[in-house]
Image: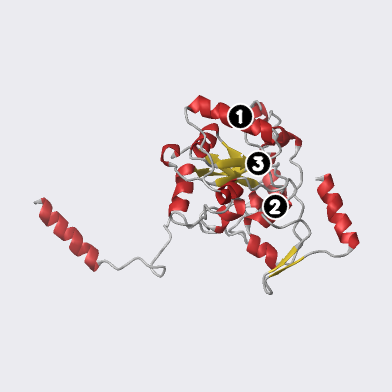
Amino acid sequence: MSSNGIRDRALNLVKILPRLTLGNLKRLSEDVKKPKNRRRDRKSGKTHGKGHKGQGQRMTLPRLGFEGGNTPFYLQIPKEPYYRNHELRKEYVPLSLLQLQRMIDLHRVDINHPIDLSSLCNTKLLLVDWERKQFGVHLTDEGAEHFDAKINLEVQKADEVSIAAIEKCGGIISTRYYDPTSLHAVCNPAKFFARGTPIPVCKVPPKDDLDYYCKAENRGYLAKPEQVLEHRLILAQRYGYMLKDFESEEEKEMLLMRKDPEQIFYGLRAGWVVNLKDRCILKPKETIHEQYYKLLEESA
């Protein structure tokens, strides 16, 4: 028989057969196990299906993983130091330069204003789940050769090639740490403002992250500006490009805009409450509240 005849028969068979629905789904006969009859009568015997003298009859089975007194299998395997304290490690959502350029081309982010974690999360193209111990965004170098935007970017981690690609176009990049309380507010500002909670003070990075954000080569927000400028020149010489000058005063003001170490939103201070319904900002006026947030900023 030719292949065309077999194909026609198969198509006709598919047309005749009923469609697969939830009503005609059935389990396989091998999967269905009949329950054992353990009635107290002659047919089931005097043990009623429980057997003779043992753990199965007395329901004293050992715990899961017990190997009859031998060393269990999971204790014989040596420990792997790579997984040490894995539950405490911080995760960072990867963001490539190609994805960032695509956001800029589609006008999902405004390059005329500084771009921080709030701007990236408001695009709905990037999700940072702080409940899964995701502490921000890690900028990767994928698409570095196609990136050509002049921006003021703030991320949590960045590679050297990514930093060079942004500074080659005349932009500025900085890395910043957010504690879990501040991260909850930054990732979804509208939801946080709707609660009517005062803006928190951003805390200092822990010991394992403090060294990273104090280094100028990482463009840390706690590094000295003089050291950052020096490392910008070093990176430009290493990758062979010239640092661009600012074209106007407005562009210079935008690119040099920075947050204070205790500040999490541009233009908003700790202790302020944003009222979305009345579209106003409520600031603390009593001296007790002002002293409280002043002490928090000094401690941070």
- Give amino acid for label 2: Ile
Tag 2 secondary structure: loop
The residue beneath circle 3 is: 90
Quadrant, the C terminus: top right
The residue beneath circle 1 is: 231
In three-dimensional space, the C-alpha distance between marks 1 and 3, rounded to whole angstroms, equals 27 Å
Of residues 55 and 173, the one nearer the viewer is 173
Lower position in the chain sequence, tag 1 or tag 3: 3
- Give amino acid for label 3: Lys
| 174 sits to left or right of 140 | right
Label 2 packing within 10 angstroms: few (<14), some (14-19), many (20+): many
Q: Is residue 53 shown to the viewer in this render?
A: no
Residue occupying image coordinates x 56% and y 53%: 120
Lower position in the chain sequence, tag 2 or tag 3: 3
Q: Are marks 1 and 2 in contact (CB under 8 Å)?
A: no
- In the rendered image, the residue lying farthest to the right is 288
From the top left corner, tell me how far across and down residue 160 is, in percent. Answer: 55, 32
- Front disc: 1 or 2: 1
Lower position in the chain sequence, tag 1 or tag 2: 1
From the top left corner, tell me how far across and down residue 264 is, in percent. Answer: 70, 52
- Front disc: 1 or 3: 1
Q: Are marks 1 and 3 in contact (CB under 8 Å)?
A: no
Question: Which dot marks residue 264?
Answer: 2
- Give amino acid for label 1: His
Tag 1 secondary structure: helix
Tag 3 secondary structure: loop
